[in-house]
Amino acid sequence: MQPTSSTSSTPQAALPGARRAVWLRQLHQWHWISSAICLMAMLLFSITGFTLNHASQIEARPAVTRQKAQLPAPLRDRLAAFAGSHADARLALPDELARWANKTFPVDVLGVSAEWSEDDAYVALPRPGGDAWLRIGVDGQAEYEKTDRGWISWLNDMHKGRNAGAVWSWFIDIFAGACLVFCITGFLILKYHAANRPSTWPVIGFGIVLPIVLALLFVH
């Protein structure tokens, strides 16, 4: 008995389904890996998105710390000479001055740029959730001030990458890339299942249209 034509074409007919299954497995793998990478950061960025949106309603009570010290005479002469020849420059403190400041105050100013004038050196020390600065005058008076605005302010600044350093900036870029993979693979998985889930495209369309409509109608 001769085999029927439908039986002989079964392997070819099965290929599209097999290819679809391979793609779905791959998409699910990329989806769960990107979601695992994003999980903690997404929670933090979601929370800080809320706190940033209500920043004016969340009361912050800054804690200010001030310290003063007297620069030793040999270092005072070194500072005066350096300030006189580098007025209006942005240069790091000489190493011996920076090491003295590091021992005297809770700072690390070695290699940090300072604003120089004939009267003093001013080192801005911005940080997430607060601010700080150090001023050393040619008269030998050194002042340090630190402002701490609390952990909510710290989280908000980390959300924006404000004064958080290059490593955190790289992390935000990597996190943004992982979020893109998470969203794109999620969309493609929805696309593959859309035939069996009639509400898929209306819900996706609603999610796309809603922010556009709100922005056009209520943001001016």
Image (tube, grey):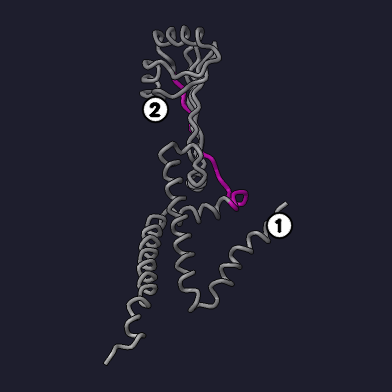
Between 145 and 175, the residue placed more toward the observer is 175
Disc 1 residue crowd, few under 14, some 14–19, many 20+, Cα 10 Å: few
124 over 84 or under it: above or below: below
| Left or right, residue 218 beside residue 94 | right
> At 72% across and 59% down in the image, what residue appears?
217
Judged from this view, the residue extending furthest toward the bottom is 1
Which label was assigned to residue 169?
none
Tell me: 142 left or right of 214: left
Q: What is the x, y in percent for residue 204? A: 56, 67
Going from N to C along the chain, the mark reached first, 1 or 2, is 2
Check disc 1 and report its element: helix, strand or loop. helix
Using the image as rendered, state which of residue 96 and residue 149 is in the foreground. Answer: 96
- Pointer 2: what residue? 108
Question: Which residue has dot 1 on it?
Answer: 216
Secondary structure of the residue carrying tag 2 is loop
Residue at 37 percent across and 69 percent down: it is 19
Tell me the magenta residue range. 53-69
Q: Nearer the viewer, residue 165 or 201?
A: 201
